[in-house]
Image: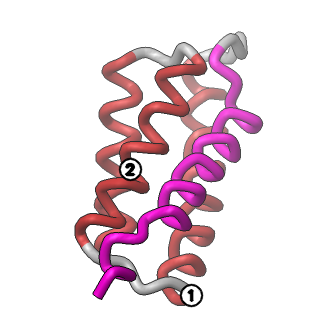
Amino acid sequence: MFSFLDARAAKAFGAEMARFYMERIPREAALKEKQFASKSKHVIGKMSLHIATYKKREKLNIYKVAQMGNAFKWALRDAGYSDDYIDKLTQWFIVNAKL
């Protein structure tokens, strides 16, 4: 029963995925729009694989997915990424975690 509410692993994974993204696409990177799109697509593809592997290993519920998304979002916000971009990326992250 209480494992339903234990989201520590999910929060850690959300923060880990934010670090994964930030290491590969730093906020201050001076990339042209085409370079940014190409690099983002590559990084997001790798993140999709990590999410799929995590979902096979862990049993997620709506609460854990929400906590994971929140940890992801706040790690990016603390790093200084733009709010609009964070919201879009977090929405993608949560949708992929739920599917």
Q: Which residues are magenta?
A: 1-27
Residue 1 or 16: which is nearer the viewer? 1
SS of the residue under disc 2: helix
The residue located at (60%, 28%) in the rendering is 36
Residue at x 35%, y 51% (from the top left corner): 92
What residue is drawn where x is 30% and y is 71%? Answer: 98
Q: Position of residue 16 (x, y in %)?
A: 65, 51
Front in this rendered view, residue 7 or 78: 7
Identify residue for label 1. 57
- Per the image, the residue denoted by label 2 is 69
The image shows residue 24, relative to residue 86, as above or below, that is: below
- Which quadrant of the figure contains the N terminus? bottom left
In the rendered image, the quadrant that contains the C terminus is: bottom left
Q: Is residue 61 visible?
A: yes
- Give the residue type at disc 1: Arg
Disc 1 and disc 2: Cα gap in Å? 18 Å
Q: Are marks 1 and 2 in contact (CB under 8 Å)?
A: no
The secondary element bearing badge 1 is classed as helix
